[in-house]
Amino acid sequence: MSSSETNWKPLSERLRPEHFDDVVGQYHLTGKNGIIRKALEKRKLFSMILYGAPGTGKTTIGHLIEKNLPDNHEYLYFSATTQRTGELKQLFQRAEQLKRYGTQMVLFVDEIHRLNKAQQDIFLPVTEKGTIILIGATTENPSFEVNPALLSRCRLIILKELKTEDLTKLLKKAIHKDRIIQEYDLNIEEEVLKVIAESAGGDARIALNLLDTLCDTAHALKRKAIDVEFLREFSVLPGGRYTKKGEEHYDLASAFIKSMRGSDPDASVYYMLRMLEGGEDPKFLARRMIIFASEDIGLADPMALVVANAAFQAVEKVGLPECSLNLTEAAIYLSIAPKSNAVIRARNAAFKVIREKPNVPVPLKLRNPVTKMMKKLGYGKDYQYPHDKGGFTREMYLPKELSQMVFYEPGNTGHERKVKERLLSLWKGLKRYRGDKNEKHNT
């Protein structure tokens, strides 16, 4: 590479690791016992989805995989943002040809979440058959953004968020290794590196390129030292502390949820829009409200789940900036709705019993008598069809050993009061339904 060619490359590219030991912060993947490093050493590379925040090393790991592939492998890069999916079919045809000659194609798909679910489907047959080894990279949660069928055929690899110490170590390495910075012969204060690392939001690319800009500026001004004052004067630090994967993300998300739970619409809207303004994906906020609608409101207001789902659909159909109105409406509605955590308590109580006794037999009367043999064994026998009995039979449906268990206990707020009254009227006199623990019922 020529000197001029090196000069215009950003520091993040000039310092891209050439060996696994050079990677910072992802030792569980690239260290001596790292998953990916071991797979390459054993020549057993697998299809994977690399999930991590920007600047955590997804592209770098792809580069290292390419460098360490066995001879009978061919590595190709595909960008979901700049290349057309029609090109993939040509790549798959090439992969089929390579396979016939004993060569395996490894296809790195950058920002795979940018492909819609139908486009992602085209990877299914070639991944299933082993025509390609797929390496998909995404900054978005694969549970939501990657086709479940495709995700099941790949191993999910999670990259850890880079800590301030990781970024500081990386910046120090840049100062000692990069030829251009070395030629500038600058005295860079330790505090400057700390400020850059803390301001980068866990993104190595941002940290390195900010250091690069500072060094270039100092050299142009014939300065030999970079202190914090110079940093503040001649650089633009990333705006705000908010990053989608940083601590501020969790703090604001927590404040948003707690404000809705506490029935404070003003605080709810404030924290939600602060996240949105900081670059948060509106779908994340809508998803949190869908969860909240069941977790903290439930049957106290059954419309809450409908409103939250409608907000999510509006986000998908309208997009930013207008969908902020839909999100605000939903946040206000959920904030002022009556609250109940009976749904999540019911779920947790049922899960606890299931995990303690996972194989309790289903009562014979509830089983489906599909064959004559099943009928002879008593499947479906004595089952009472509720619609033949006026809509309710007072029949026990839980297995006998669990017949006294109560998972759902409605509260006294909103619509749940009516639910409670109905359950009391249906089950009154039976031990199975307790209602309020302090309330006495005739037995």
Image (spheres, rainbow, N blue to C red):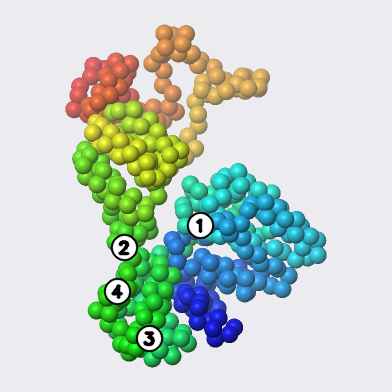
Reading the image, the residue beneath label 3 is: 219
Give the amino acid type for the residue marked by disc 2 in the picture: Gly
N-terminal label among 1 and 3: 1
Mark 1, secondary structure of its residue: strand
Q: Is the C-beta separation of discs 3 and 2 under 8 Å?
A: no
Q: Is the C-beta separation of discs 1 and 2 under 8 Å?
A: no
Single out the mark in the foreground, 2 or 4.
Answer: 2
State the quadrant of the C terminus.
Answer: top left
Q: Residue at x 45, y 66 (%)?
A: 56
- Say few, some or many: other residues with alpha carbon within 10 Å of mark 2 (under 14 / 14 to 19 / 20 or more): few
Q: Residue at x 38, y 74 (%)?
A: 210
Reading the image, the residue beneath label 1 is: 138
State the quadrant of the N terminus.
Answer: bottom right
Reading the image, the residue beneath label 4 is: 195
Reading the image, the residue beneath label 2 is: 239
- Could you tell me residue 400's position as x and y percent? 43, 27
Of all residues, the one furthest to the right in this rendering is 101
Q: CA distance from mark 3 to mark 4?
A: 20 Å
Give the amino acid type for the residue marked by disc 1 in the picture: Thr
- Could you tell me residue 160's position as x and y percent? 43, 64
Give the amino acid type for the residue marked by disc 3 in the picture: His
In the image shown, does 442 or 314 lie closer to the viewer? 314
N-terminal label among 2 and 4: 4
N-terminal label among 3 and 2: 3
Mark 4, secondary structure of its residue: helix
Q: CA distance from mark 3 to mark 2?
A: 25 Å
Q: CA distance from mark 2 to mark 4?
A: 13 Å
- Could you tell me residue 307's position as x and y percent? 36, 32
Give the amino acid type for the residue marked by disc 4 in the picture: Val
**Residue 272 tag number:** none
